[in-house]
Image (cartoon, rainbow, N blue to C red):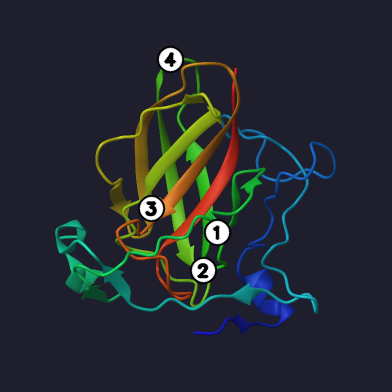
Amino acid sequence: MSKVIFAAFVAALAGAGCSSSNNSSDGGGTTGSDTTPGVVIGPPDHHCVSADGGLTVQTIGVCNVADPSLEPSNTASCSVSFNDSSGADGGASTDSGDTMYGAAGDDDDCKYYISWTATPIQENTDTFFFVTATRLADMKPATCAGIRPDVSLNINTGAVPPPNPSTEIAPGVYKVGPIKFVAPGKWTVRFHLFEECSDSEDDSPHGHAAFFVQVP
């Protein structure tokens, strides 16, 4: 499916969906909440803003699952449909978007608005993130996303991810963790949504959103 471009007032309705930022610079304007543990302030990201100032939104289609055992147990109550594509080439995307500043922003494909808070972040201490995911196409909670984190400081240093998908504690709200940061520094925490879905289709529910997180 092609992307749908909404007018500027829809961008406002999305809660300034592109208020976080990419990794092009350490300077510029501020964004996010400086009271959120670990938040890194930086220039705002605009990858989902069209040339006319509106918000570019990718609609969400069917989740094609190569391994049906990975489907959520409550698919009937999910916001997307699942299709058994056993044996098919998953075709996962290798492009998962730039890392953003702040504590909120749009995912790489402009499907979701993601915001997060965290428990106190310290070196070698279990940290939990509370991630809220909203579908940009209709501003409804992204339920059954089973968020999985991908956490790294650099090419040689990462954090062991939790073994299971995150618990959905309210519609579209996920408790992600525990994550243990093994060294201080500016980490990248990437949240994967609907990891079980093939990412080969433009409208796949699969999505990613990455944020810088400062560990003292």
CA gap, disc 2 and disc 4: 33 Å
Q: Depth-wise, is mark 1 or mark 3 nearer the camera?
A: 1
Is 184 above or below relative to 94?
above
CA gap, disc 1 and disc 2: 6 Å
Q: Which mark is residue 158?
A: none
User: Which numbered disc flags the more N-terminal residue, 1 or 3?
Assistant: 1
Q: Residue at x 43, y 71 (%)?
A: 140
CA gap, disc 3 and disc 4: 25 Å
Residue matched to label 1: 107
Residue 100 is situated, as x and y percent measured from the top left of the image, at 65, 46
Asked if disc 1 and disc 2 are in contact, CB closer than 8 Å, the reply is yes
CA gap, disc 1 and disc 3: 15 Å
Q: Depth-wise, is mark 3 or mark 4 nearer the camera?
A: 4
- Secondary structure at badge 2 equals loop
- Report the amino acid beneath label 3: Val
Pointer 1 local density, CA inside 10 Å: few below 14, some 14–19, many at least 20: many
Asked if disc 3 and disc 2 are in contact, CB closer than 8 Å, the reply is no
Residue matched to label 3: 173
Residue 62 is situated, as x and y percent measured from the top left of the image, at 33, 77
CA gap, disc 3 and disc 2: 16 Å
Q: Which mark is residue 111?
A: 2
- Secondary structure at badge 3 equals strand
Left or right: residue 146 versus residue 15 is left
User: Which numbered disc flags the more N-terminal residue, 2 or 4?
Assistant: 2
Pointer 4 local density, CA inside 10 Å: few below 14, some 14–19, many at least 20: few
Residue matched to label 4: 124
